[in-house]
Image (cartoon, grey):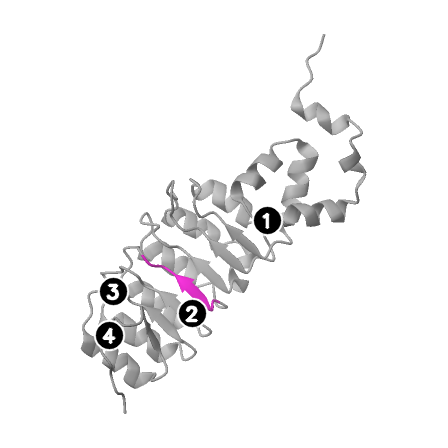
Amino acid sequence: MKRKGIEELDDQNRPIDRLPFDLLAHIFAMLTCFKDLAQTSAVCRKWRQWVKESLGRREKLSFSGWKVDDDSTTRLVLHAYSLKELDISRSRWGCQITDRGLYQLSTAKCVSNLSSLSLWGTTGITDTGVVQLISRANSLQHLNIGGTFITDTSLFAIAGSCPHLKSIVLWGCRHVTENGLLALVNKCRKLESINAWGMRVTVDCFVGLLTISPALQIEPKGMLPNIAVF
């Protein structure tokens, strides 16, 4: 007797299969957890297709806290045509994203529409991958690239490609220098805040940044002494 496999569920007349396709895609688009998406996609062929279609409607996607690699991340992001917020931070289990993954992500249609991107703690990336991705992310308003080993090269690329940038997290980016920060503040005229905790730059550098943009917020608050800029 033939053993029923999980794929055979496709042929059964389940109540959920009677729902309109658009409604199911909308329901799956409400899943916010990468694990839930992966498990849902594994149920059967139909559900896998619905998850794929739902990705096209999704505006937020987070891989934070999950052990994902270049290929698994790219497979999902390539289908997320409407994506505006992408979080691939390294967290509990560790994200395995490398420059190869950033190159692949740079080909996704959604990249030019991203308003928020987090690469927090992804230590497998370098300036090479960041420059490739950032060169297409021209709509970015919020960027978290803290805890990485980027240098001024990445900041020069951000300064030249992200005119709408409002906030950037450079927490612990100890290879970034005054030159990179000055280029960033000079070109990103909408920049409102920089998280500079743990950076190897002097107070004089921050005074220079505030001279260019007096309203700029240097985070975390209290890190700098009271500075009057005239």
Mark 4 or 1, nearer chain start: 1
2 and 1 marks in contact (CB < 8 Å):
no
The amino acid sitting under disc 1 is: His
**Identity of the residue drawn at 43% across and 78% down:** 190
Q: Nearer the viewer, mark 3 or mark 2?
A: 3
The picture places residue 89, in percent across and down from the top left corner, at 40, 51
Please give the range of residues in magenta: 140-146
Give the spatial CA distance, label 4 vs label 2.
29 Å
153 vs 45, nearest the viewer: 45
Q: Mark 1: which secondary structure? A: loop
Give the spatial CA distance, label 1 vs label 3.
34 Å
Q: Which residue is mark 3?
A: 176
Dividing the image into 4 quarters, which one contains the C terminus?
Answer: bottom left
The picture places residue 178, in percent across and down from the top left corner, at 23, 72
Looking at the rendering, which quadrant does residue 133 occupy? bottom left
Mark 4 or 2, nearer chain start: 2
The amino acid sitting under disc 4 is: Leu
How many residues crowd around disc 1 within 10 Å: few (fewer than 14), some, or many (20 or more)? many
Extreme-bottom residue of the structure: 230
